[in-house]
């Protein structure tokens, strides 16, 4: 994919200077899209029509000078790189322009061709870094928002799964107790005459623990049969007493 040309705007009230710049930078036409205007007002008109990556302006111009122009550019098009061309006599005004217009670099007249090209390219590199920084910051904000949404969704799923597991655990617990009761009844039925043996044992013992000895409760039976035997078969012992 072919990279778009960088747009460079040159501003100087002297037509000879503009023509010299155009001839000097002719070889950059393949990578730079250049425009040349002779006043600050025309420069603002060009900027209103399309954006420029770099603005190079002379300091001394009738009407609005270069410092005022670049200050306007800084206010309305802050993403552009601003370069000022000035003479030694303009040093105080240049310092003020740098402070007000946030100028990237200034070049003293007369400048060399290589110096001007290098300065513009350095400004373009800085602009590329700033754009990449903005892209990465936007990507980071987007990813943080996506991560936050994913965390919220994960927490909801964990809560739902925890509730499902608790419900399943309670259901399994009830099924386990029911199974114990069913298998206990089946084991008693399998023995036939022992059906209800555990229940009668609890009744005879006066409770559910089955630890109360039976011989002291039935002294007549204990004479005919050893107490240890009676306690072993307490279900039948109780049945005999009830039948007497």
Image: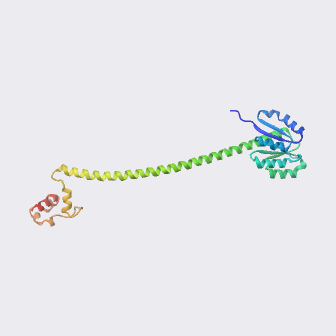
Please give left or right for residue 82 compared with residue 189 in the image: right
Residue 226: image location, x then y, percent: 12, 61
Query: Colour mode?
Result: rainbow
Q: Quadrant of residue 39?
A: top right
Q: Quadrant of residue 227?
A: bottom left
Residue at image position (19%, 59%) is 201
Please give left or right for residue 226 compared with residue 181 in the image: left
Residue 210: image location, x then y, percent: 22, 61
Q: Is residue 38 above or below residue 209?
A: above
Please give left or right for residue 126 compared with residue 97 in the image: left
Quarter that holds the N terminus: top right
Residue 78: image location, x then y, percent: 75, 47
Residue at image position (79%, 45%) is 82
Quarter that holds the C terminus: bottom left
Residue 103 in sight from this viewpoint:
no
Residue 227 in sight from this viewpoint:
yes
């Amino acid at each position: 994919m072919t990279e778009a040309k960088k747009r460079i705007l040159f501003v100087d009230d002297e037509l000879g200077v503009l023509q010299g710049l155009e001839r000097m930078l002719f070889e950059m036409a393949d990578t730079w899209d250049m425009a040349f205007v002779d006043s600050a007002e025309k420069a603002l008109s060009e900027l209103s029509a399309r954006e420029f990556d770099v603005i190079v302006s002379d300091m001394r111009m009738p009407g609005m000078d270069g410092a005022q122009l670049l200050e306007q550019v800084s206010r309305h098009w802050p993403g552009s790189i601003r370069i000022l061309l000035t003479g030694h006599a303009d040093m105080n005004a240049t310092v003020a322009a740098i402070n007000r217009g946030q100028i990237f670099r200034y070049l003293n007249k007369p400048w060399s061709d290589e110096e001007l090209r290098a300065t513009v390219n350095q400004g373009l590199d800085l602009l590329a870094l700033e754009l990449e920084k903005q892209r990465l910051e936007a990507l980071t904000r987007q990813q943080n928002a996506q991560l936050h949404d994913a965390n919220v969704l994960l927490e909801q799923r964990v809560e739902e799964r925890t509730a499902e597991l608790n419900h399943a655990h309670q259901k399994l617990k009830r099924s386990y107790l029911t199974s114990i009761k069913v298998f206990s009844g089946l084991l008693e039925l399998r023995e036939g005459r022992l059906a209800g043996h555990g229940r009668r044992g609890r009744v005879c013992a006066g409770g559910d623990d089955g630890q109360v000895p039976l011989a002291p409760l039935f002294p007549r039976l204990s004479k005919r049969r050893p107490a240890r035997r009676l306690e072993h078969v307490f279900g039948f012992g109780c049945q005999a007493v009830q039948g007497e």
